[in-house]
Image (cartoon, rainbow, N blue to C red):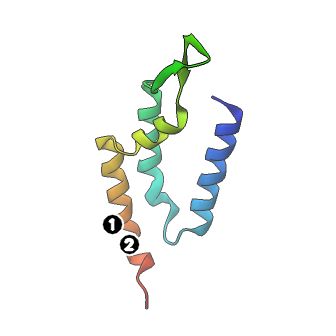
Amino acid sequence: MDPFLKDQGDAWGAVIVQRMKGDVYALAAVAEQVERAHAVGDMAVIRDESQPQNAKALPLLHCGEVIDRPAVRLEIQRAVVALGPSYVQK
C-alpha cells in the first residue's frame, strides 16, 4: 500500500474516533467488513495516459466503492443506528 495513502487513512480514522460520540466498538464490524472487502484486491485501474502500456491503480476510487458494497453498507447502517442515540440533541 502507498505510504501516503496509509498515512491519510490512519489520520482520517483517528479524526473519526476522536470526534465521535458513543462507543467506538460500534465501528468494529464496519472495520472488519472493510478489511474483507479490501482483501479481495479488485481495485479499479485505468490506462496511464503517459504510459498507455501500464495500468494505473485508483486507490481513492476503491475506497469510495468499498463503502457501497452490501456487507460494508449494512455494517455502516448498523453503526449509525447503534450510535444514533449518542448524537441526539438535548
- What residue did someone put label 1 on? 81
What is the residue that sits farthest to the bottom in this orientation? 90
Q: Is residue 6 left or right of residue 52?
A: right
Residue at 37%, 64% in the rendered image: 80
Mark 2: amino acid: Gly
Task: Say which element carries label 2.
Answer: helix
List x then y, in percent, for residue 17.
58, 61
List x then y, in percent, for residue 32.
44, 42
Kindly identify which numbered label has been placed on residue 31: none
Image quadrant where residue 18 sits: bottom right
Dot 2: few (<14), some (14–19), or many (≥20) neighbours within 10 Å?
Answer: few
Mark 1: amino acid: Val
Quick check: marks 2 and 1 in contact, CB under 8 Å?
A: yes
Q: Looking at the figure, which quarter contains the C terminus?
A: bottom left
List x then y, in percent, for residue 50.
62, 17
Task: Say which element carries label 1.
Answer: helix
Residue at 66%, 52% in the rendered image: 11
Dot 1: few (<14), some (14–19), or many (≥20) neighbours within 10 Å?
Answer: few
Q: Is residue 18 left or right of residue 37?
A: right
- What residue did someone put label 2 on? 84
**Eyeballing the image, is 77 above or below 57?**
below
Residue at 48%, 23% in the rendered image: 45
Q: Is residue 20 visible?
A: yes
List x then y, in percent, for residue 41.
46, 24
Q: CA distance from mark 2 to mark 1?
A: 5 Å
Q: Looking at the figure, which quarter contains the N terminus?
A: top right
**Eyeballing the image, is 21 above or below 33?**
below
